[in-house]
Image (tube, rainbow, N blue to C red):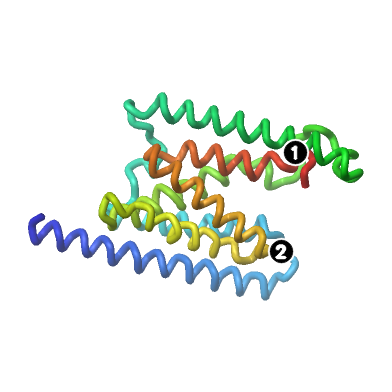
Amino acid sequence: MSDKVRKEKISDARIFYIGLIAAVAVVQIVLKVFTTLVPDVQSQVLSRITEGIMLIFAVMFALRTTFVQPWFGLKIEKSNVRRTVLTCILIAVGIIVLFIAARLVLQHFSEEVAERPFFRAYLNIKHRRYYLISVLLQEILAKGVLQHGVEKNLPDDKWYIALPITALVFGMLHIYHSIYYILGAIGLALASGVLYHRQKNVWSSFVLHFLIAFLPRCFGLK
C-alpha cells in the first residue's frame, strides 16, 4: 500500500470515527433537551428525530469518506441475488410460524391475549403506517454506514469486532426506551449484523428487523 493510499485510509478512518462519536453525542443531547422541554413526547417521535440526524451524518460520510457502502447496502450483487432472496424468504416464514405458534399457546393462558384479534395490522396507529420506511432507513444507517465503515477499517478475519460496536451504538440510540427495549435492540443488531456481513446488503437484516418489530402486535402478542 502506497503512502498516499495509507494516508487517505487513515484520514477516512479519523473522519468516520469522529463523525460517529459526534453523531451519537448530538442525538443524545438533542433528545435529552427535547424530552426535558416536552416530557410527554412519544418515543416514536424521538425515533424519527434520531433517524433524521443520523441520515444527515450518513450523507456526510458518503460525501467525505469511503466508509459508506455504495448504494448504502441496497444493491444486491448478481452473484448474491439467489442467496439473499432465499434468506429473506426463510426468515419471513420462520418468524411468521414462530409468532403464530406463540399466539396459539399464549391465548390459552392469557385472557387479554385471547380477546385480541388473531391477526390485525393496526395501521390506524400512526407510526405503523410508515414503519416499513423507518426500518429500512435504520438498517441503511446501522449497516450500510456504521457496520460497513467499522468492518472496512478492520482486517478481513476480524470483521466480528464490528458487531458489538455497531450493536452498542444502535442500543445507545434507543436509550430513551426501557432497558428491555435497549437490550432487544442490541440483540437484534448482533443477529442482523451477521446477516449483513454474509449477504453484503441490508435486505436480509431489514426483513428480520421489520417482521420481529411489526408482527407481535399484529398477532396480539402485545
Please state, as top left, top right, bottom left or bottom right, where the N terminus lies in the image: bottom left
Residue lying furthest top in this view?
Answer: 82
From the image, tell me which residue sits under label 2: 41
Q: Is residue 2 above or below residue 74?
A: below
Task: Check disc 2: other Cα within 10 Å, few if <14, some if 14-19, many if 20+.
Answer: few
Task: Check disc 1: other Cα within 10 Å, few if <14, some if 14-19, many if 20+.
Answer: some
Mark positioned earlier in the residue sequence (1 or 2)? 2
Name the element at disc 1. Answer: helix
Q: Residue at x 27, y 62 (%)?
A: 13
Does 173 sit left or right of 165 as displayed? right
Q: Is residue 137 above or below residue 108?
A: below
Residue 178, image x and y in percent?
A: 68, 63
Mark 1 or 2, closer to the camera: 1
From the image, tell me which residue sits under label 1: 102
Q: Residue at x 28, y 57 (%)?
A: 153
Does 131 sit left or right of 102 as displayed? left
175 or 47, which lies in front? 175
Q: Is residue 116 above or below residue 138?
A: above
Name the element at disc 2. Answer: loop
Label 1 to label 2: alpha-carbon separation: 32 Å
Residue 2, image x and y in percent?
A: 8, 57
Does 170 sit left or right of 182 as displayed? left
Residue 220, image x and y in percent?
A: 79, 40
Q: Residue at x 61, y 61 (%)?
A: 182
Q: Is residue 126 above or below residue 65?
A: above
Q: Give the residue type at disc 1.
A: Ala
Q: Residue at x 40, y 37 (%)?
A: 199
